Every structure is written in structure tokens, then in C-alpha cells.
Image: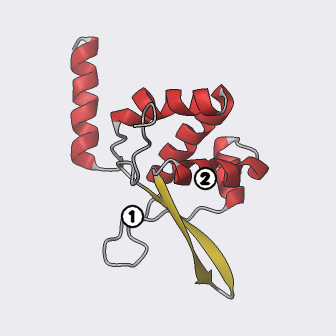
Amino acid sequence: MNEKEKALSQKEHLLTSGGYAPIPHFIYRELLPELKEKYDGKTARDCVLLYGYMHAFVNGQSEGQAYMWAFPSVVQIADDTGIHKDRIKGLVDILVSEGVMVTKKIPWHGHSKKMYLPLYERSCPIPVNGN
């Protein structure tokens, strides 16, 4: 089996076995360069990492109200990604302002829990060149 066949076999296996989320091409082709220009390379990279991370942690149980929402704690996000916990809120705020994530707080055992909904398309397209 050559490299291309191996890659295609791996892709087919992943698509049939589940355990993945499709990440739209525009995240890397459009959003990443836009964020790099607006902020800086580290912020852009960490936003894209956080976006993909949230997709990996969405709730896949369709019967519940939390279906499609991710709810890792800030500590868990920081431990898993290496992003400093003080930066996470700001990065999420950027993703929300770019229209690729929605957040909400819900009551949780006497406290509140932040929920994250990573979107597959921008909810409010960002105008290009003022158009």
C-alpha cells in the first residue's frame, strides 16, 4: 500500500467509525489569515486550536439539551491545550465576534457552567473591504 492509499484508507476508516468533526476549510483558508492580520500569529493559532478543540468535545448525545454543545472547564482547556487560562475567555470572545462560536451559561449544581457551540459556518459574515 502506497502513502496515498494508506491516507485514503485511514480517512475511510475514520469516516465510517465516527469520532471526528468536520472542520470547514474556511477556518484555515480565511479565518486564520484574517485573525493573524487583526491580532497576531499566536492569537490566530490559539483561536483555531480552541475552535477545533471545542468541536472535539461537543456532546454527541442527541436526546439531551446539551447536544452539540461543549462544556469543558477553563482548567481542562488550559491543561489540554497549553493555552494559559487567562487567555481563554479573550480567545472565545474573538471566536464569538467572528461568528464561529456561540456561548451561554447554564445553572450547574448551584453554580453556572459555560457552554460552547462551535458553528460550521459564520453566523454573521464579516464584510470584506467594507462590503
Quick one: 20 or 10, which is closer to the camera? 20
Taking the image as drawn, is residue 45 in sight? Answer: no
Q: Mark number for residue 55? A: none
Q: Is residue 64 left or right of residue 96?
A: left
| 128 lies above or below 17 | above
Residue at position x 28%, y 30% from top? 10
Q: Quadrant of residue 115?
A: bottom right
Badge 1 density bin: few <14, some 14–19, many ≥20, Cα 10 Å:
many
Q: Is residue 54 left or right of residue 119?
A: right
Q: Position of residue 72 (x, y in %)?
A: 59, 61
Q: Position of residue 36 (x, y in %)?
A: 59, 28
- Between marks 2 and 1, how big is the CA–CA gap? 17 Å
Instruction: Tell whether label 1 touches label 2 (CB within 8 Å).
Output: no
Quick one: 101 or 131, which is closer to the camera? 131
| 78 lies above or below 111 | above
Quick one: 43 or 16, which is closer to the camera? 43
For mark 1, what is the residue? 68
Element carrying mark 1: loop
Residue at position x 58%, y 41% from top? 47
Q: Earlier in the sequence, mark 2 or mark 1?
A: 1
Q: Mark number for residue 92? A: 2
Taking the image as drawn, is residue 91 in sight? Answer: yes
- Which residue sits furthest top? 2
Q: How is the image coloured?
A: secondary structure
Amino acid on which the number 2 mark rests in the picture: Val
